[in-house]
Image (cartoon, rainbow, N blue to C red):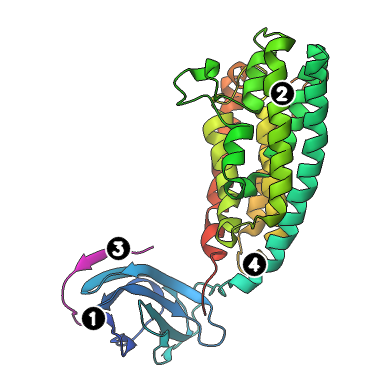
Amino acid sequence: MSGCSSGAPARNVITVTTGTCGTGWQDPKPGLQTLRIYDGSSVGGEVDLIDPANGGIYGEVESVGPGTTAAMYVNVGSGAYQFRCLLDDTDPMTGPVIRVGGHVRGATAIVPVTSNDLIEPAKEYHAYVTTGLTVLAGQTRALAAAVQAGNLAAARAAWLPAHLTYERLGAAYGTFGNFDDEIDGRATGLPGGVDDPHFTGFYRLEYGLWHGQTAGELTGPAEELYHDVLGLQTAFPAMEVSLLDMGLRTHEILENALEFQLTGTDDYGSGTTLATTAANITGTLELLQVLHPLLVGRYAALPQVYVWLNRLQSLIDVQHQPDGTWTPVAALSTTTREQIDAAIGQALQELAPIAAITEPRTT
């Protein structure tokens, strides 16, 4: 965290310039404290407090501006510290090693993740999505065939498994580009709403299948969905999952579930948004699995992530009825809804630091 204000350097403010990095920390002591970082240069940039032994980060200010002072909140323990300065248009610099005496335990430095560290997880996730798209293509083909044959009961049965397969691919949505809007776009914002000709994909079919539309009305949208999935499957091998998105999506997948699934916003008639939330949990767990080697030594609270995801999963699972149907969100009791909201809220809180931990850095 950081905050900025303008002003000249004062006593015990740590100063950075284009030629010096982190001078002025007088009589450093252990404990929770706010370090004031003054940028005395003519450019802005990032300043980190690091462990000189491994480059691990104790604290950072990401965007201190020229002539301004930013706050760095840190829990300083006994040991060695060093400032690293990454000012714009300037080579990275490190300042002198600063030693804090005593035997006080402070925060643990987080070793930065580099782009190279993320390449293998990105490859693993790319393979996961590739497999998922193969399954999805077969499922949407069967869905389109059922609609074309006029067997709408079979189409309704085929719709949910196909949609859940897509919803498990959450970290790749940004990679899919326009395909995501075509395959899983909402009617929100379209001039004609659910009747708009540009309303396509899974939600278009859901609306029609659960609102009495005929096979004739739904054959075109079903075939369009299948062909869009085939187009994505063909294009995906040349697409790259953004390294920057890898950690960010661990939080965003469930954030979207909270906003659109657990509010019932994305329920176009089937009442299955809890099933979609379960698929989103699976997608989050898959992403955590490929990132696990990077997280396990960097994020002490990682076990709590799984505790709350499992808690959320168990609350969702009991809403899956023996006949295969799901309890609609609107039919949940107040107590159950509060329990689900509390679990996903805590899971999101535990997931939130992962984006910063896995943000690729130059070291």
Q: Which mark is residue 105?
A: none
Label located before the other in sequence (2 or 3): 3
Among the 4 quarters of the image, the one containing residue 164: top right
Q: Dot 4, how many residues are within 10 Å of its Cα: few (below 14), some (14-19), or many (20+)?
A: many
The residue sitting at 38% across, 68% down in the picture is 62
Foreground mark, 1 or 4, reads: 4
Q: Dot 2, how many residues are within 10 Å of its Cα: few (below 14), some (14-19), or many (20+)?
A: many
Q: Marks 1 and 4, Cα distance to the nearest angstrom? A: 34 Å
* Residue for badge 2: 222
Q: Marks 2 and 4, Cα distance to the nearest angstrom? A: 37 Å
Tag 2 secondary structure: helix
Using the image as rendered, state which of residue 61 and residue 104 is in the foreground.
61
How far across and how far down the image is residue 15, in percent?
27, 82
Report if the CB atoms under discs 2 and 3 are less than 8 Å apart.
no
The residue sitting at 60% across, 39% down in the picture is 180
What's under tag 3, amino acid-wise? Gly
Label located before the other in sequence (2 or 4): 4
Position of 134 with respect to 70 (left or right) is right
Residue range (magenta): 1-13
Q: Which mark is residue 118?
A: 4
Q: Is residue 310 above or below residue 109?
A: above
What's under tag 2, amino acid-wise? Ala
Label located before the other in sequence (4 or 3): 3
Foreground mark, 3 or 1, reads: 1
Tag 4 secondary structure: helix
What's under tag 4, amino acid-wise? Leu
Foreground mark, 2 or 4, reads: 2
* Residue for badge 3: 3
